[in-house]
Image (tube, coloured by chain):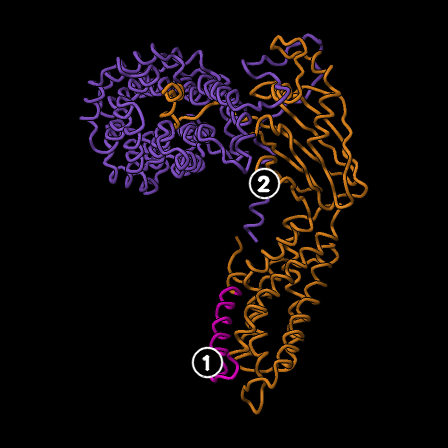
Amino acid sequence: MKRLTLLLIGLWLSGVAHAHVSSTGFMTLNVNGPEVDGSLELAVRDVERAVGIDANRDGKITWGELLNSEHTLNQYVGQHLGLSSQSGTCPLKFKTLEVNERVDGKYVWLAFTAHCQTAPESLSIRYHLMEGVDPSHRGLLTLTMGNKVRTGVLGGRHPAAVEASPFLEYLGVGVEHIWGGIDHLLFLISLLLPAVLTRRDGRWEPVGSARAALLDILRVVTAFTVAHSITLTLAASNIVHLPSRLTESIIAASIIVAALNNVFPLVTEARARIAFAFGLLHGFGFASVLADMGLPGDARLLALFSFNLGIEVGQLAVVLGVMPIVYSLRNGSLYRNRLMPLGSAGIAALALVWVVQRALLPSG
Amino acid sequence: MKRALLSVAVLALAASTGTSRAAPYVPRDNADVLAELPPGAAHVAAPVSRLDVALPLAQFYIGRARATGDLRYLGYAESALVPWLTRAEPAPPPAVLVLHATILQSRHAFAASLEELDRALAAQPDNAQAWLTRSTVLRVMGRYAEAAAACEQLSKAGDASITTLCTESLHGLTGHLESAYASLVALPVQYLPEAARAWRYSELGEMAERLGLDVAAERWFKEGLKLAPDDFYMRTAYSDLLLRNGRNDEVLNLLSQYRSMEPMLLRIAIAEKRLGKPGDTIALLANAFAVEQQRGDPVHRREQARFLLDVEQRPEQALAAALENWNVQREPEDVLILIRAAQAAHRPRAAAPALDFVRTAKLEDVRL
């Protein structure tokens, strides 16, 4: 009963929790080539809790006591904080201690540099500060890499390593763009719908073999990929520039061409050429995404490559999802005479709306 | 494409705002005091290895956290329990689990708290403290039927007067406010443990407020604070009563010694704003909320919503915070802030979950 009484206080008051923020560290990392400039801020009180700097045990932490513990503190931070890049550990070198005032009190400011062997493409951060002392401690990270700024939470159940990789980031943007950018996909799919068929005497017939269908798909996808990679690279390198209103309008028009070609077939065997010709314009469309985002100064090529790879991965996933279904439908007249032409007509109608929106209506 | 751009922009924004940062400096004098340690905050050389030392130590830290509002103490309490919490075999002792549940509850990690309590009760079904804490957590979450069932279990394991408090406080939220108030008024104080007396006063004060009896409510709060001056829940409840009646100066007096606690700071900020006395309170609060937001802590969403609504006067953001808060906790205060924020943002429909809740639970409150 005694324990019950002890804990009763506040049991019913969980609605209000306690003030003060929990123990929080602040870290900045600035990647400059192989050098990473960093700063770590820990509350003076947290430093005392973790390493013990109150030498005379009077409950007051003075600047002198902190200076006397500088070596111990650096050692502690060195053991509980680590940076590594793709080329291995980036050893930390601490600069002299300083103090920073935050609204909730004074913080110890540790500036450091980390030397990586080569410029980091990805950076892993091991953050175990205050471990075993205050499990609720977290580190708030601000990481600057090129002209990109990222923030993250370190420690606790969060993953011990934070990937700050332009490769993964731009790969993700590429995938996201192709899935979000339904116009590119509709263009490609319009070109692929007849891949399981062949045109004979003015009529569609199922393609002879799976191999023939596969080859046709491969030709179209490759032509599209090669073409948009060329113009994406040219545009991202600022060699060629086209106004986005023009490219966006032509991209929409390209869908109409590809889709109507399924309803009123003009080009049946050489659809890869359509894919290539219009793929050049789609590349400019992709480039506008990169232009909006900006490429990191020190990792331009890598980012461009991974963005493009992301587009291909996303595109391939859709092709792999759609084409087996289309292939399985190829023998039925429903697909040949209804689904494919009507679906294509629908796509063309949708694209017509886009053309009007993009080319004719006032922008914005 | 737009989404990707937006998230990049948001990240950049988050990085540039957050906590204000001045330039670091080197203090002039070695004798400059950088920090004064509160009790129990000094360095501990080795972790405690004995359970009979760790349990009272954790209790001491939880007590400090409650009395001061200092969240770091919850971390110290948890670290004292870690050796037992992290071992796989044998399972942690129920007493450790109950204390851990209390720490989690204080951080508003209600689901995790319930899990620890379930583990404790599986091992020790007559653990009165576990049932009481369970009832409290469920009540804060608005799961009144389950909370009542936990009170019921408490009656088998614990003190009858505490069971009455537990049960009647729930009756007061579920359509029997008047009779619950009467039965708590009649509850003989002398049989209650001291801590439970403060609970009774606090409960009576709030019930009186919900009944519209502000004079009686003030009397209960004042008496309760005489008994338990450090009870900051009661102190904030009393200051809310004063704020509602426009007695802003009295709020500043009542809270002048409690500027270290966020919920208190919030009331101070509201009073200061109304009196046209701007101080550093707003900056302190804004910083604390920004850090919490970046950490991903849900602890003070209710206060944040009120701060955005009553101090910063940004109703849209207040509504977003109030809705987020509603997902975590559902006390009468949470109902109020959600309805007020939805009205201020001219989106009355956003308060539908709170209004449904009031109807289903039969919550009575003249402030609604």
Q: Bounds of the magenta span?
A: A329-355
Which mark is on residue B11? 2
Q: Which mark is residue A100?
A: none
Q: Residues within 10 Å of mark 1 (few under 14, many from 20)?
A: few
Q: Camera-side residue: B182 or B205?
A: B182
Read off the chain for label 2.
B
Q: Residue at x 71, y 67 (%)?
A: A226
Q: Amino acid at mark 2?
A: Leu
| Residue B24, x across and y down, in percent | 68, 21
Residue A276 % position (x, y): 67, 71
- Judge whether A117 appears above or below B78 on screen: below
Most extreme residue toward the front is B90
Relative image position of residue B171 (x, y in whole percent): 23, 30
Q: Secondary structure at mark 2?
A: helix
The chain displayed orange equals A
Please give the label number shown on residue A338: 1
Q: Residue at x 55, y 51 (%)?
A: B2
| Colour for chain B in the figure | purple
The answer to whether residue B316 is seen in the rendering is no
**In the image: residue B49, left or right of residue A342:** right
Distance of label 2 from label 1 (alpha carbons): 48 Å
